[in-house]
Image (cartoon, rainbow, N blue to C red):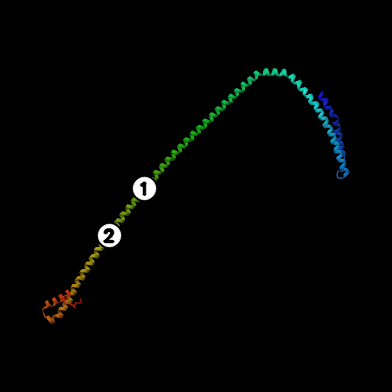
Amino acid sequence: MEAEMSLAVFDPFKALAVKVQAEDAALQIDHTTPDGETKLRSWVRTVRGYRAGLEKIRVRAKADALEYGRKVDGLAKKLKSPFDTIITDRMKPLDEIEDAKRKAAEAIVEAERVAKEKAEADRLADLERREKEAVAKEAKFTAANNLLDAKQREFEQYGREKTIAAEAAVTATKEAEEKAERERLAAIAAAHAEQHRLDDIERKRVADVEHRESVEADIVKALFPFFGTNSVTARNIIAAINSGAIPHVTINY
């Protein structure tokens, strides 16, 4: 009731607000003229005065209301004390029950969290183990493949070397046979050439002997008028000339 009475101080301003709004709506002022500007400023000051009066009433009414509120709070606090005491005393076992429930729920949550973490740790450990096994298996497979590749390359290299050696042996044998054949043919050709040379020397020797005998026979004939049939003397003279025993004399064969 006291609060309602404190709000009654605003009733005059309710009617004043309606009146001011009506006057403002009906007000026609040309603020572009000096007189209109003066009237507009005067009207705004009047409205501000109404508002200032309302603010003063609000401050006084609020102060009264605050004092009333403090009285209300003090009385209510005093009246609530027995109720609060009963509630506090009776809530202790209920709070203990709720605390036990909360702790039990927290224990369940913690157990679930621990179990979940353990399950996740086990899952990660199993995943890591399987990954390591896969890596080890891959490494073993790779090593086996590398060894197989190395053996294959070694076998292929051995095959190539064997083929090259066989081809080289065939080539060497062929070259040796060709060389031996060339040497044999060269030896035959050399033997033929040597025989031809010897035959030619022999022919030349025989031809030279025959030529010399023919020349010497002509000399013997030329000396016949001097020695007659004594050809031995003529041949001795020829031998002396060929040996150089008779100076300044040569036989032109």
Judged by depth in the image, the label closer to the viewer, 1 or 2, is 2
Residue 199: x %, y % from top left: 21, 67
Location of residue 137 by image quarter: top left
Q: Residue at x 52, y 30 (%)?
A: 121
Q: Residues within 10 Å of mark 1 (few under 14, many from 20)?
A: few
Q: Which residue is mark 2?
A: 183
Classify the position of the N terminus by image quarter.
top right
Location of residue 181 by image quarter: bottom left
Q: Which residue is mark 1?
A: 159
Q: How many marks?
A: 2
Q: What kind of residue is marked 2? A: Glu
Q: What kind of residue is marked 1? A: Gly
Numbered tag placed on residue 14 in the rendering: none
Residue 228: x %, y % from top left: 11, 81
Q: Nearer the viewer, residue 24 or 71?
A: 71
Q: Is residue 28 visible?
A: no
In the displayed structure, 151 sits above or below 119; it is below
